[in-house]
Structures are given as C-alpha cells and as structure tokens.
Amino acid sequence: MTFTFDITLMAGPWQSAYFELRTDDDNCPFHFRVRRSGDTFSINHMIDGQWGERTDFLLPKALDQISTIQISVDGAAVFLLVAREAFHHVMQMTLDDPQAFWVAGEHLTWTDSREPAELPEEQGTPQALDEEIVLLYRRLVLPGAMDAAQRAQIKAEAEAGVGRYLAFVSSVPLVQAGEALTILDVELDNPIPALTARLLMPNVRLLKLVRGAAEGQAIDAVTRANDLVPLQMCSVEEMAAVLKDETGPVLLQGAEVFDLLGEVLDGLGDERRRTLSIFTTSDEIIPGNRVFPCANVQITCPSGWTLNHSASIDVMPRRHGLDIAVAACNAGDFLPHCVESLLCEGRDDVRVIVVDDGSTDGSGEALARQFADDPRVRVERKPNGGCASARNYGRLVSDATHIAFVDADDFVSPGLFADLYDLALYSGCEVVQSGYDFHDAALDEPFYPSAEEDRFRESPRTRFKDKDVLRLFSDEIIKGQPTIWRKVYRRDFLDAKAIYFPENVRAFDDYVFQIFTLTAARDVFMLPEHKYHYRQHPRQHSKQRDERHFYMLYMFQMIVKRSLSEGWPNFRPYAESIVDSISWSSSMLRTELVESFLRASARFCVGVSKTYGPAVIEDLLPGIEHPDFEDYYREEKEKVLRVAPGPFWAYFTGELYHPDIVRMRQAMRKAT
C-alpha cells in the first residue's frame, strides 16, 4: 500500500523544519529535515533509540522558492518530490499497515492519504485510484496502476507549466509546406514535453527516449488511457540514425539534447543542420558553432542566459557567425600578429577579413601567402581610400550575421572574439564588448591598464561561461575615447540604423561611429577579463599632431544633425563628449594649428548653444583647458547675439575648416 503526504512549509523565521514517521518512541524509520542554512535537506532514521548516519542533499531551488514537498511511502521505499526533482530512500523497515506508525513534524503542515476509499468486500485488496492532470487545458488520466512516484512526478511537471515550450513551437517555422516533421524527445524521466507535443501535433512522428522498460510502460499507459497516438520508444542510437540517415525536418527537444546527441550534431553537415530545430536546457553555454546553422533554437542556460533564434527572421541569406574586418595599410610590422591573435581555436564560425587598403609594403600579399591554407582568413585588396573606406568595404564583402572592426596594429587575448560572439547570441544585444588595456613595447612592463579598470571595478557582475560579465548602459560609455575595435555588432542592427563609417573622414572616423551605435543600442554587455591590447607606437593616428584633427569638426556637425533628425531627447552626454574631444585635440595639435582649431570649435559650441540652449553646454566649456578658448567663445557668441536660436544652427558651418584647406592656408602663410 502506498501512503502519500503533501507537505506545506509554514511561513516565518524558523531555521529548520522536520517531518518524520514513528512506530514508537524509540523507532523513527524516516526523518526528513529541511534547513535554511545553505538551502539543504537531510534524511535520517532512529532504530532502538539510536540515530543513524545522516545523508545531506542540496535543495534544487532556494528554500524561499519551495512551498510544497510530496513524500510517498511504498513499503520500505520512500519517494520525495522536491521542486520537481525526485529523490529515493530505502528505510530499514517496511511500513505496510497504516495503523502501525504515526506522523510528527514542526514548522510544516501535511495532508495524510492513509485512509483509502472504502471498497466492496468482494473486490478484495484496494486498488490505487486514477488521478488527473491538466495539460494544455485538457484533462489527462494517470492510471492508478502506474507507480506512485511516477504519477507524482508527472503531476509536478504538469503543474510547472509548458508556457516556454508552447511559445517556441507556436512561433517558429518547424516545417515548410509539404514536409513531414519528426520529433525526437530527449527528456529523461519527464514525459510532459512529449505528451505536450502529442497533444499539439497528434499525428506527428514522435520518438521518445526512455531509460528502461518501466519508464516506457508508464508513458504508454498514459497515452492509451487518454486515447492518444502512442509514442515510439527508442534509444539514443536510434535517434542518432534519424539525424544521420534521414533528411526531413526534425525538432529535438529535452534537457539532454547536447549531453546525449552533441557529438552526432557536431558531425552533421550544414545542409542537414539547417533542417533542425532545438528546444533544450543546458548547464553550460553551448558555443554558437555547435548550434548553427540550425533553423530554430532555444537554449536556456543558468544565470538567465538564453539563445533564442527563429528561421523566420533570416530574411537575408547570412552565415551565422562573426567576421572581423581588419583595415590595413602598410601595417606589415604588426599585421601577422594581429590576425593570429584574432583566430579562435576550434571556431570556424569566427573569421577574419583583412582589407588591404592600397598597401605599398607588400603586407597584404605576404599575409595571403601565410594563411593560404586557412579558410578562416581572407585578404581583400582595394585602392587606398582611408580607414573608414576599408572598414566599410570589409563589412560590404562580409556574409556573417555579426561583425567586428579591428585595427591592424593591435592584438587580443586568446578566444576573445569567440566569447564575444557567443555573448551576443545569448544576450541578443546589438553591441557587446571586451575590456582593453594598452601595450607599449618600449616600456619595461609593456601592458598597462585603461582608466575603465577603476571605473568599473565595483560594478555588479554575473557569469558567462567562466568569466565575469558586466551590464552597462550606453550613456555610461558614450563619452571618452572611442573603442569600436573591441566590440561585436549585430549586422542587422547596423543596417537597419544606417550606421557606416564616414568615408570622407580620413582620421578618427571611429568617433562618430561609436556615438551613433551606442545611441541606437540599448544596453551593452562587457567581458572585462578579456583584453583587447591597444598597441602604442609613434605612427598611430592618435599621436599625429597635424591637420587631421579638423575632421572632428565635421563629425561634431554630423552628430548635431542626426540628433535633430532622430529626435534625441537629451543632448547633454554628446555635449560632454564633444567638449572632451575639443580639449584633447587642442592639446595634441602643432602650435600653429591651435588657434584655427579653437576658433572653429568655439563657433561650433555657439551653434550647439543656439540649437539646444546654453544650459546644455556652457557650464562644460571650462573643461577645455586651453586658456584662450573662453575668449574665442565669447567673441563668436557676440557676433550672433541678435540672431534667433533654432534648429537651423545645426546646418550653419561658417568658415570651412577642412584639413585640406587648413594645409593649403598653412602653405600659403609659409610662402609669404
């Protein structure tokens, strides 16, 4: 005879609660105690006044998330159902007589099933009664002949709900017209997903993985009792044969998909993988190259990470992967090291596109020879058009769903871009990034940290794979140095927002690209332990003191125009970024260029004040450290004192300060 106790934990500040079965004062064949400390529970017994050795377990969930526990006693066997997980214990005595023991407990209540329904005398030994569950608004019978523990677990799984699964199968295109779907259910000890699939798709071929005959018989009993089309019970080997030998669309569902069939999936060709849909959970992050090009995927992992993809959004025929565009012009001293660092071991979905932007040092040809046997690296050649042109070209020839842009003189920590790509998949973010530091080979200790090491040191963190991850808001990182080179972007995001590098800007083009992407993006996830190594050397654009800094003025105006056309609600963060950039450029320029740059910058700042109001920018201007800027700003402001404010100021340029014109004027002054 089976006795079932439904236990409800009381509310309150108690530290432990217990439930036990006693036959007398000296014998307690079953003692169950749950503890708040460490979210644990234990099982013990007392025979002839002596306690046995206690067995401890971790609760499947935090104690505050558990309200009920079910305990079933069948002879000497005890089955516990705790937060949908089953535990088994064998007592040292058998309890068949309902009057032979009593129940005691503290800080919990229970319902007791030891009073079986009265049966006619001629029926003999009482039989277990049928039970019911509700699944997809249909009542299903659980035959009384089933094992009590199996019935209890099925009831608990049904009560947990099937909302996520229902949302998945109803929102993704599992088959095309005229195709026949096969479902492979790889969920051990839980028939609810298979029964749900059978209710939703009553005539679909459905194979259910079972561990043994008892599990198969239980599932078969449920389907027969409810007049459902029987499921086909099978082994892992039979499922593997379906994947390898057949061609039709397949839905793989269940928690053990990658544990039991991962190697089979890894060995399938792309054509076969495109016919697969996967709905599963995993204790660890499944890398993108093991998932794609499957058609539809939902993988739920610890800490709330979910890879969610539907074939219905693949409107462009893009390869699921990451391309890293490297703009290179006469970078032979650094380029091979850069490319080698970008490649990720075991990841053919992370590839490198080197755009040789009119190099004259033979670096593009040398690199093509070096990586001739590696399909992950390709070299594209084009006439010189500047870094922005090369980056746009790399994006143009890429066929990947995600893209990154790296400078040819830098390098990265191992596996950086594989982890960033996976983070982009599981977070769904438009932009993700790594940490970065500086590298100067001329120093005794060449690596030194960036300012953000201290800035984000106390930021809350969670885990992704084996690394910390931070969640940043765009306006937190929109100011300061542009760092587009340590980021991964969703290609569809860049296309939809029409964000490109301005090709008429031949230096510092990453500044406006960062502003536009972070404005359009939501939040940004960051892996601070991974490092992009920003190499410091004399030939860097950022170390040049020439007329190229005047490109900043053109990009400032791009920002104001876009802010008006898109209706940005708060221009203040951009004003801060602009003021910081003016201060930095004026400190870098050659002496003879500073006055022209400051006058043009002052005129621009007056335009911002006329467009958005003085409160947006004027209190920031003391941050421009050059002592003459205040005078230039006052002079420019007085010139237009009687001119009305308004958005037309965004289109007022005044005297043209293009770098080529600045060079021409400098040459004319020297000539005279």
Image (tube, helix red, strand yellow):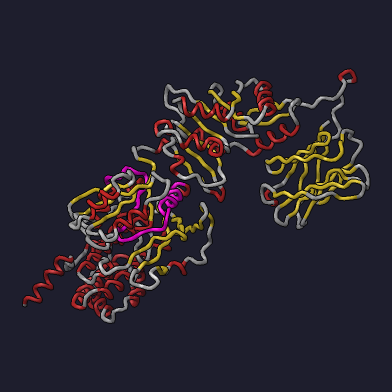
Q: For residue 384, say whether it is visible.
A: yes
- 81 lies left or right of 479: right
Instruction: Give the residues in magenta.
Output: 396-425
Can you give x and y, in whole percent of width and height, for residue 4 in the image?
80, 36
Q: Is residue 187 above or below residue 340?
A: above
Q: Is residue 403 magenta?
A: yes
- The residue lying toward the viewer, choosing from 79 and 377, is 377
- 99 lies left or right of 543: right
Can you give x and y, in whole percent of width and height, for residue 31 in the image?
83, 46
- The residue lying toward the viewer, choosing from 265 and 468, is 265
Q: Is residue 532 above or below residue 203?
A: below
Q: Is residue 272 above or below residue 401?
A: above
Quadrant of res 521: bottom left
Q: Quadrant of the N terminus?
A: top right
Quadrant of res 110: top right
Q: Is residue 418 above or below residue 645?
A: above
- 174 lies left or right of 515: right
| Number of marks in the rendered image | 0
Can you give x and y, in whole percent of width and height, for residue 531 in the image?
42, 60
